[in-house]
Image (spheres, grey):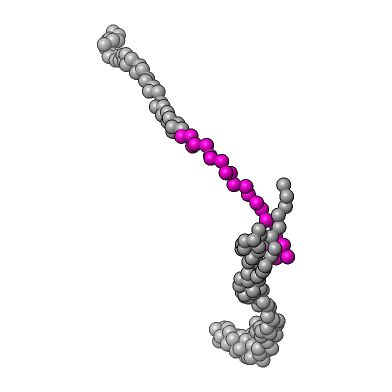
Amino acid sequence: MAQEFGKVLSSIPVIQQVAVPRQVCTTQQVEVQRPNTGAGAAIGAIAGAALGDASGGHGAARAAATMIGAIGGAVVGNNIEGQPTPQVRDVQRCSTQMNYENRVVGYRVEYEYAGKRYSAQMPQDPGPTVQVQITPVSTGSSPAPVYAPPAPVIVTAPEAVYYERPNNPQISVDIGVGGYGGRRRW
């Protein structure tokens, strides 16, 4: 069997636009507010309660002065502590973006073989020649088709199963009727 080759007349790339996913990340600086520690309010409440207790007198008046001193001291202590300075952090955010690229997906090849022109699409550029596959065609008459009847379909039904019913059992009842001398059976 000989290998046959055709002469390539042209090879034009077939270009298609293809979506290519790409991950894009950016870094941004974000201010993060730190929470108040509460230490100023706690120390202020203790100091205010001590002052209220010392100046409150006796009994209910002293308890009220201690309570008012604690609340006032907490408010003043919280204001003295103030808000902490915000902290700056780098935050990276990523997203997927689609880029479209032109890519060669094949080649439209025009070639000549035995004085005739042909064209085909190929996955790669074949170069100056292209290998040609020759398929012989039968010149004789083909045999007549043979027709066969369809195969018979056999369907079987399941066998019927009969169960014999048992005889009804005999029931006897023994009723003891008490009396002076014994039992009677009915």
Where residue 113 appears, as percent x and y from the top left, is 66, 59
Where residue 156 appears, as percent x and y from the top left, is 41, 27
Front residue (pair 65, 25): 25
Answer yes or no: is residue 19 visible.
no
Q: Quadrant of residue 25?
A: bottom right
Where residue 56 appears, as percent x and y from the top left, is 60, 89
Front residue (pair 126, 113): 113
Figure check: 15 above or below 50: above
Front residue (pair 25, 16): 16
Answer yes or no: is residue 2 visible.
yes
Figure check: 182 above or below 24: above
* Magenta stretch prevailing secondary structure: loop
Where residue 90 appears, as percent x and y from the top left, is 70, 81
- 154 lies left or right of 169: right
Q: Quadrant of residue 112?
A: bottom right
Front residue (pair 53, 6): 6
Quadrant where the C terminus is found in the figure? top left
What are the residue bounds of the magenta stretch? 124-147
Q: Is residue 66 magenta?
A: no
Figure check: 16 above or below 144: below
Q: Quadrant of residue 151?
A: top left
